[in-house]
Image (cartoon, rainbow, N blue to C red):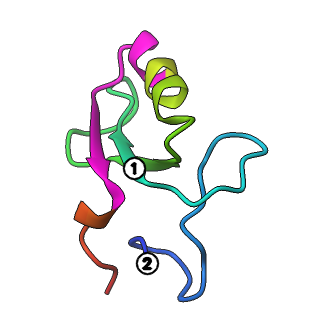
Amino acid sequence: MRLPGAEPDQPTQCSAKGCRRDASYALVWRNPKIHDEDRHKTWLACDEHRTTLSEFLSFRGFPLEIKPIDELPPSE
């Protein structure tokens, strides 16, 4: 599977620093102080880092949605 904007052969790797595992989840978030409501960023998380990455974003008050990675729309 490819994420929107990703290169064709780019792996879906966890976004946690130093982690090389395949991601299972997409953390879709935005910073309301600088992003419009229609602009979102996506971090990927493996099973081990899903909680720590989502807590990092939640503590900052960023709107966050966690989805299984296979529920993301395919890239065009």
Residue under the point 54% across and 66% down: 12
Question: Which residue is labeled 1 in the image?
Answer: 25
Locate residue 7, reporting x and y percent: 56, 83
- Tell me whether circle 1 and circle 2 mark residues in contact (CB < 8 Å): no
> Range of the magenta residues?
57-69
Instruction: Give the residue displayed 31% in from the left and 87% down from the top.
Output: 76
**As shown in the figure, which amino acid type bears the numbered disc 2?**
Arg
In this picture, residue 38 sits left or right of residue 10: left
**Residue 55: percent from the left, percent from the top?**
46, 19
Q: Between residue 42 and residue 51, name the one nearer to us.
A: 51
Considering only order in the chain, which callout, 2 or 1, is on the residue closer to the N terminus? 2
Q: Quadrant of residue 9?
A: bottom right
Q: Judge whether residue 11 is colored magenta.
A: no
Residue 43 sits above or below residue 55 on the image? below
Q: Quadrant of the N terminus?
A: bottom left
Type of amino acid at the residue the image marks with label 1: Tyr
Q: CA distance from mark 1 to mark 2?
A: 13 Å
Mark identifier at residue 60: none
- Check disc 1 and report its element: helix, strand or loop: strand
Which element type, helix, strand or loop, lies under badge 2?
Answer: loop
The answer to which image quadrant residue 21 occupies is bottom right
- Picture mark count: 2
Q: 75 or 17: which is nearer to us?
A: 17
Residue at left offset 73%, top offset 40%: 17
> Mark 1 or 2, which is nearer the eye?
1
Q: Is residue 63 magenta?
A: yes
How crowded pointer 2 is (Cα within 10 Å; few <14, some 14-19, many 20+) is rated as some
The spot of residue 63 in percent (x, y) is: 28, 27
**Residue assigned mark 2:** 2
| Residue 67 shown left or right of residue 34 in the figure | left
| Furthest residue toward front | 47
**Mark 1 burial class by Cα count in 10 Å: few <14, some 14-19, many 20+:** many
